Structure formats: structure tokens, C-alpha cells
Image (cartoon, grey):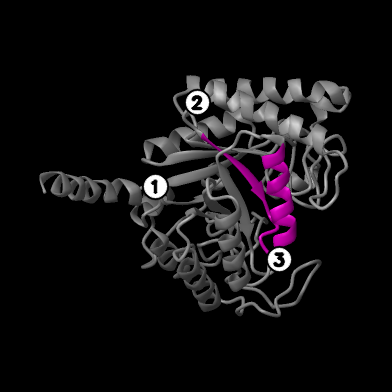
Amino acid sequence: MKRILFALTLAALMLPSMAAKRWLGGDISMLTANERAGVVYKDLAGRPVDALEFFKRCGWNMMRVRLFVDPQHAPGAHHDQGVCQDLPYVIDLCRHIKQAGFKIMLDFHYSDTWADPAKQFMPHRWLETPSEALPDSVYAYTRYCLEAMKQAGVAPHMIQVGNEITFGMMWPAGRVEPLKDDNWGPFVDLLKAGSKACREVCPDAKIIIHTEKAGVWPMTEAYYNRLAQAGLDYDIIGLSYYPMWHNTIEYLGSTLDNLARQFPSKPVMIVETAYYFEHDGVNRGEEDFSHCLPGTIDGQRQFTAQLVQELRKHKNVTGLFWWYPEENTYGTPHRQFNLNRGLFNNRTGCALPAITEFGRFK
């Protein structure tokens, strides 16, 4: 009987620590640039706030930060879109993040500019590097960056090896397609090099492999099966979910169920999500709003509530991160990087109601 009581007591004591493993946050890579430009952040009641302190009050516990290789080599237009996160910038931002009480997720882009399904540009410094030497370059670069962060006292708690790399990275050398066999060996060699450096420098950090086909299960399944067959060392499946690109929330739920069955040892995190608080509903490019809520302040709130409700059904989902929640041009009329998908109103600087729904994930 005493043993049973002890076991029950131990289980009860463990519950808070288990709950603490659910991570909530956002990719706030533009925060430093915004603050330097004079952006004013306000809470829901319209009172000026420190953004990090406000996010902390909202229950967030981890922040994601992207890292570009040499952003000075990015196209000029990309600089106006927020491409500025070199290593010194990232270390400075991460110091503030840590001082505010958050854990850090580092997102290696392995590119001088945006890396996503449509583009994974080879960094300028490796354009003349022979393909067979690229894994060594990735290893050395990854190790150097992590050692610098560790030395600065901002070692990451989680590390993404690549950003939205469904179709590979560092094209053309690392370009792949999930449903085709071509070039997977060279691509996996790049991932293994990055993973190896992460394990050596930050052995306690969790490694994330991030893709963005949550709305197409056959591609997601094929992709992570290939990584399993290749013996890649990583810990967490990272997914992007934007409803205008990635199918319905119900479909996302089925993907999460499938991942739990197929890859039971891999927790899943939604490392990017967002939705419009202002949009005309017109499809542009590959956007599809036919199943989406209106792009309004209340539509954004409803989307967030529905997403959180779905994610809380899935025990394998351990993290949720809003992409660019710090978007805000209030107080800086000349700033142009407006997507209207952040968690602050660009016209007033006030936090939007969706941030309250977002906090219910924890």
C-alpha cells in the first residue's frame, strides 16, 4: 500500500513538470530592428508595454530566432522585408530573450536570405565550394555559431537544422522532392553534418527538422520515412501551418494523428503559424481562402481558438509558435514590412484578441 501511495504521490508531483514541457512562443526575429526603429507596443487595453515582458505575461516560455549566414548578400529588397539576422544580431536579441526568462529556439536557415519551399538559395560564401565539401562547411559553420552563442551565454534549448526544408536546402546541391528518390544522399549528408555539430556543442538541445506540407500527408509521410531510413539524428518533427496554404485544421489534425502512429518517438511542434487580422480574401499565388475564416480581427481570433482547440487533442504536440507576432509599424510610418498577420494592430500598436486565445495552448 505504501508503495502505491508513493507512486501516486510521485506521479502527482511530476504533473507540473510534464505540463511545463508544452512550449508556447513566437519567432520574434524582427523585435530588435522594430525597437530600434521606435515601434510602440501596447497591451490589449492600449497601455505601452515592453514586448518581451508582455509576451511573458501572456504565458509564453520560448522564443524562436532565425539566423542567416551572410544577410548582407541578400537581395536589396529582402533587407526591407526583415533580412538582417546575422550572428551578432542574433546573439544580442537572444541575450534580451534570456534575460526576460525565455528559452531559445535557434532556426538555422543555411541561406543569406529567406529559405522556404519556393527558395533555398546557396549562401554566397559556399557558391564555389565543391558539392562533396559542403557537409564539412555546414558542420564548421554550425559549430562556430553555436560555440559563439554558448560563449555569450545564450546557448539554444532547441535548434532547427534548416527552415521549411521539405524540398531540401542549399539548392541545387541539396535539392530533393519527398516523392522522388533523386539526391536524397547529398541532402541527408548536409543534415547529418548540421545535426552532428548541434550534438557536439549543445548536447542537451533538441534538434528539429522543419517541413511545411502538413496539408499533404503523403509528402509528409514520405519525407520523414526517408529521414528514418537514413538514420538521421534528430528529436522533433517541426511543421508549419498556415490555413491559406496548408489545408483545413481538420486535415492538420489527421496529419498529427498519422504522425503519432507512424513516428511515436517523435514529438511534433507547430513551429510556424499565423493568420491575417486584415485581408481582402483574394487568392494570390498559392493562397486558398475557400475554407478560411475572414481576414479580420475576429477572424484571426477564431482561427487561433480553433487551432489551439485542435492541437490540445494531440498528446504528441508539444509546442506552438506564431511567426512574426511582433509585427507592428505603429510609431514608425516609414516601415513597410506589413503582412497584417502579427499579434499587434499596425494602426494602433495594440495587442490583438488572438493573443489571448493563443495562450490557451499551455
Image quarter hosting the C terminus: bottom left
Whole-percent x and y of residue 345? Answer: 52, 66
Q: Residue at x 58, y 59 (%)?
A: 273
Mark 3 secondary-structure assignment: loop
Query: Of the residues tagged 1 and 3, which is closer to the observer?
Result: 1
Amino acid type for the residue under numbered disc 2: Pro
Whole-percent x and y of residue 91? Answer: 53, 30
Q: Is residue 306 above or below residue 235?
A: below
Mark 1 secondary-structure assignment: loop
Q: Is residue 202 above or below residue 90?
A: above
Cα distance in 3D space between marks 1 and 3: 28 Å
Residue designated by label 3? 245
Amino acid type for the residue under numbered disc 3: Trp
Does label 1 or label 2 sit earlier along the sequence? 1
Q: Which residues are magenta?
A: 206-229
Residue 203 circle label? 2
Snapshot quadrant of residue 33: top right
- Residue 327 appears in view: no
